[in-house]
Image (cartoon, helix red, strand yellow):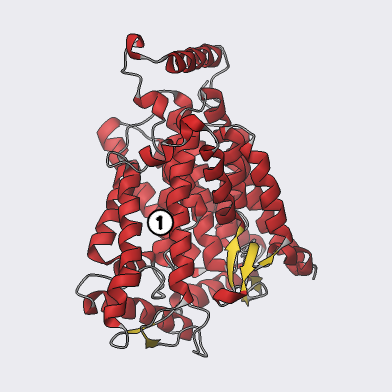
Amino acid sequence: MEPTLVGVLVIALGFFAIFGDAYRTVTIAMLLTLLGSSAAVNLPALGGASVLAAPLFTGFVVLRLLLQRHRRFGLLSALAPSSPGFWLLLAIAYGIFAAFIIAPLFYGDIWVYPISRDSQSASLFSIQQLEFSSGNITQTVYAVGQVLLFAGVSTTVANASLRSRGKILDTLVLLGFFHVLTSLLDLATFHTGTSFLLDWLRSANYITWQASTVAGLKRISGLFPEASMYSIYSMAISGILMSLYLHGYRLRITRPLFISTICLLLISTSSTAYISIVVALFLVIFAGIYKFLARQETTFLRLVFGIMLTLSFTYLTIDAFAPKVLDQVAMVIDEMLLSKMDSDSGASRSRLNSSAFSNFLDTMGLGIGIGSVRTSSFVFTLLSNLGLLGTLAYALFIRGIVVAPQGQTEANVILMRACRFGMLGMLIGASVSLHVFELGSLFYILAALSLPQQSERGLNRTAGNWTPAERRRHMAQARDLRALAHRQPVEGKR
């Protein structure tokens, strides 16, 4: 085991969070997700696998709850059959069962593209017979950690005060700001030849493409190993910021951050980003038309028209004053989209998905377990890793998050919708390009924050049935409500 400087910082932040409130814990957990290639610990014994900063911090989220006697059973309630977390637990449990029980039945009979580092294959896209690998261990650990993170964050914020939940909204804005900042740092250090300044934040044993360019433009990766992972994360940030912008929350900050995030995606030269943006734009248009016809709401349509007008104005301006820029843009689009499928990379990614679907069929829909196969789309990852039953359970988890009732206070409504938009953005990006089952810690933090809080779920109980502790908690929340009522309305809603 090889600890890193980032690991020492995470441990220090972990102890800092243990003695803090819900806001501090969730804030640290979210901000650490920005470090997509920062290893807290490297594990040479497992083929050089790396434990990233955010997954390591999950242990402190759980430890904080275990040290609080009245919160210990909250982890179990977050995974109860009445909660969406139950379906996540079921999906992960089946994936682990498939990896260690079902997959051995097909060893030597099925050919897969492995994800393990101990493979003797010379190429990233080399096929080999199915066998047990370190990928089964590392991805299983990550999957269990994701369940614990979801349950831990759900329990942490379950009884948080309205003021703390309002602060979490500001944390989402802060997350967007730091995402834009790290993206600009990636560009600045590349063009000034000082990329080594960020090497200590890129300590994971991953294959990286930090210096890749397309048509003279750097492929933006931020603090992630490569551009596609950066794009998936950026889609989540875009969804969060778009929702906050549509709700008029801190417009002077969320509007420029949303525009900046979209612009960074457009110049990232990532095919994942371009396809994801197109899919997301069609969904926004569809949602806008539906809302307009159903409830006469025009917010989404105004957003779409605003984006189209901005793009049109930008195109005409560049065409008039810098036509060579458009030629460079055309080269990028041709190389990253139009010619992608004819390239070796496009053909390889197509083979990954085709092989994964064949693995799904070869196992008669049972799946071969978490960490057994590399794909190029989260959809095919679910099918090949979890099989039909596991995929159905995971779909029910997503459905449970999406259809959960909205919060009863304005702050909770804005928070839940922003988190759901972020989840949707990440799912779109992952469906376009993701090699493994691990979606990342941010997705499960957003999922936990997308659920109605326990204090709201219990509002129908009468005061006569409250315990003394519940009575004190509800009285404190009532004071928070009165305090919020005297505050100025959310910016943009005046």
Is 148 or 453 nearer to us in this picture?
148
Considering every residue shown, the one lying at the far left of the view is: 364
Q: Which residue does the image show at 63% across and 39% down from the upper left?
A: 17
- Residue 233 versus residue 361 in the image, above or below: above
Q: Residues within 10 Å of mark 1 (few under 14, many from 20)?
A: many
Mark 1 residue element? helix
Q: Which residue does the image show at 79% across and 64% down from the upper left?
A: 197
Considering every residue shown, the one lying at the far top of the view is: 464
Q: Which residue does the image show at 30% across and 61% down from the upper left?
A: 94
Is 90 or 346 nearer to us in this picture?
90
User: In the image, 331: left or right of 391?
Assistant: right
Count the numbered circles shown. 1
User: In the image, 291: left or right of 123?
Assistant: left
- In the figure, residue 90 lies in which quadrant? bottom left
Kindly tell me whether residue 482 is visible in this rendering.
Answer: yes
Residue 12 at x, y = what percent? 70, 47
- Residue 39 versus residue 339 in the image, above or below: above
Is 99 or 359 nearer to us in this picture?
99
Is 100 or 126 nearer to us in this picture?
100
- In the figure, residue 421 lies in which quadrant? top left
Kindly tell me whether residue 419 is visible in this rendering.
Answer: no
Residue 332 at x, y = what percent? 55, 73
Residue 362 at x, y = what percent? 23, 79
- In the figure, residue 206 lies in which quadrant? bottom right
Instruction: Look at the image and tell me in which quarter the N terminus lies.
Output: bottom right
Kindly identify which residue carries mark 1: 427
Residue 214 at x, y = what percent? 60, 75
